[in-house]
Image (cartoon, rainbow, N blue to C red):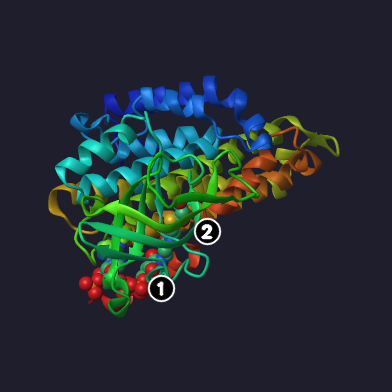
């Protein structure tokens, strides 16, 4: 990466190197085993919290590391290069959970709900999707009714990253169905003691298998009205605002997967021989390597640019939706492209569980689906372009 476009400060290099060292020494040796078993990696996630990776952009007073968005994407990239499961747990914690409370929470909510998650002593989750409402997030069925000084929550949520283990959850529900998107509100749940709340079935997944995903069930779940995040009816805006941040995190995850697939491919192409020469000497392999490298560098530029826009937005309040969607769209399709090429370059060995290449392939796919599918990103980008000017 050329330093001329995005010069990294000593602090940025330090966090990148710390994440790289940690990923190589603590995560790499267990990644395949946790992928196989589908267990949640509690110990390494706890250590990531101790290192400040679970609330990178959150001020120290709320338990975070008080660094910037570029620091966040650099750390995400390094963790993802070794294991996309650890990376998504980290991304949801940082972007979808912590950022939402930092931006929209009251001081009391920040003390109670942000501090433990940003400091990594508790895990946070974000719950928007429902069985019948995915891309069309404004059509959710679950609802919350105000009763005195409480809200009573009912409904079923699905595809919640860290749902089976999260200590705290931001959940979105309808408070006024007539108003559609403007009738959605956000609530903070303490998953350990919310009556009427339970975790539903854990999803058996193709990839990111060490990241636990589940349904959440709310049956007359009563929470104090002080747990409402933002104003009544502000939930959709909160959900979309934090997804803008989340999509930069997933783009960085995709970049890390793409790089891992690329590096494995280069090493294999240099060493494996067929028809009397290294397979990298065949143009068919060389051109794949060229396309992978070019897309990786282009993804990185889009991601760093989106990270800069997000950083700028902290001062100006300007939205960076377009840049975040472009970064996620391009990086996730790059991850899939690179993982696909890596399996092909490795041939039979790319299909074997003996090498991590097949895991990169399984893990890459979800980056084109969660936090807004590639179709939704194209919708957001094209709408923004066609409506402006
Ligand atoms: N920031 C702030 N406000 C936003 C916004 C954003 N990025 N996007 C939209 N809004 C506001 C709009 O300005 C509008 O408000 P006004 O009328 O006051 O202007 C309001 O929200 C409604 O916006 P739209 O008309 O654009 O709403 P829509 O119904 O057409 O939906 C959409 C737009 C982009 C398709 C949106 O529904 C979307 O992003 N869908 C995908 C949902 C998604 O990403 N789900 C993933 C869930 S998380 C996950 O994957 C699981 C996990 O744990 C990782």
Q: Which mark is residue 139?
A: 1
The percent coordinates of residue 337 (x first, y second) are 60, 53
The percent coordinates of residue 146 (x first, y second) are 25, 64
Q: Residue at x 25, y 46 (%)?
A: 101
Report the residue marked by disc 2.
369
- In the displayed structure, does residue 266 sit left or right of residue 215? right
Looking at the image, residue 52 lies above or below residue 112: above
Q: Secondary structure at mark 2?
A: loop
Of the two numbered discs 1 and 2 in the rendering, the one whose residue sits closer to the viewer: 1
- In the displayed structure, does residue 212 sit left or right of residue 9? right
Q: Whereabouts is ligand 1, in terms of quadrant? A: bottom left
- In the displayed structure, does residue 151 sit left or right of residue 206? left
Residue closer to the observer: 119 or 168: 168
Q: Which mark is residue 215?
A: none
Q: Is mark 2 within 8 Å of ligand 1?
A: yes
Crowding near the residue tagged with mark 1, few <14, some 14–19, many ≥20 C-alpha atoms within 10 Å: some
The percent coordinates of residue 212 (x first, y second) are 54, 43
In whole angstroms, how far apart are the C-alphas of marks 1 and 2? 19 Å
Task: Judge whether residue 258 can be spotted in this image.
Answer: yes
Q: Residue at x 40, y 73 (%)?
A: 139
């Amino acid at each position: 990466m050329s330093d001329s476009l995005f010069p990294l400060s000593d602090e940025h290099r330090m966090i990148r190197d710390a994440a790289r060292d940690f990923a190589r020494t603590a995560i790499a040796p267990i990644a395949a085993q946790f992928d196989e078993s589908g267990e949640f990696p509690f110990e390494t996630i706890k250590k990531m919290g101790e290192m400040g990776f679970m609330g990178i952009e959150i001020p120290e007073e709320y338990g975070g590391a008080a660094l910037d968005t570029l620091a966040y994407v650099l750390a995400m990239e390094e963790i993802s290069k070794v294991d996309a499961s650890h990376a998504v747990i980290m991304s949801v914690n940082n972007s979808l959970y912590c950022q939402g409370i930092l931006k929209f929470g009251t001081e009391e909510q920040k003390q109670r709900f942000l501090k433990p998650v940003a400091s990594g002593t508790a895990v946070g989750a974000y719950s928007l999707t429902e069985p019948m409402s995915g891309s069309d997030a404004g059509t959710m069925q679950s609802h919350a009714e105000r009763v005195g000084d409480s809200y009573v929550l009912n409904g079923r949520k699905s595809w919640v990253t860290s749902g089976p283990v999260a200590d705290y959850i931001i959940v979105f529900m309808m408070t006024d169905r007539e108003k559609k998107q403007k009738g959605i509100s956000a609530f903070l749940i303490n998953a350990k003691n919310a009556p009427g709340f339970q975790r539903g079935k854990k999803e058996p997944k193709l990839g990111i298998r060490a990241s636990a995903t589940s349904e959440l069930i709310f049956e007359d779940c009563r929470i104090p009205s002080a747990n409402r995040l933002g104003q009544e009816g502000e939930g959709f805006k909160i959900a979309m605002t934090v997804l803008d941040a989340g999509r930069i995190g997933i783009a960085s995850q995709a970049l890390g997967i793409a790089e891992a697939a690329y590096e494995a491919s280069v090493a294999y192409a240099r060493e494996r021989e067929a028809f009397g020469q290294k397979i990298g000497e065949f143009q068919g392999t060389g051109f794949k390597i060229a396309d992978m490298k070019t897309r990786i560098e282009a993804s990185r530029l889009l991601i760093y640019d989106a990270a800069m826009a997000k950083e700028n937005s902290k001062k100006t309040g300007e939205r960076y939706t377009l840049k975040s969607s472009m970064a996620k769209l391009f990086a996730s399709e790059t991850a899939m492209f690179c993982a696909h090429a890596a399996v092909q370059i490795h041939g039979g060995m790319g299909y074997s569980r003996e090498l991590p290449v097949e895991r990169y392939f399984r893990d890459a796919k979800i980056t084109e689906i969660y936090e807004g599918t590639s179709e939704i990103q194209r919708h957001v980008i094209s709408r923004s372009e066609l409506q402006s000017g």
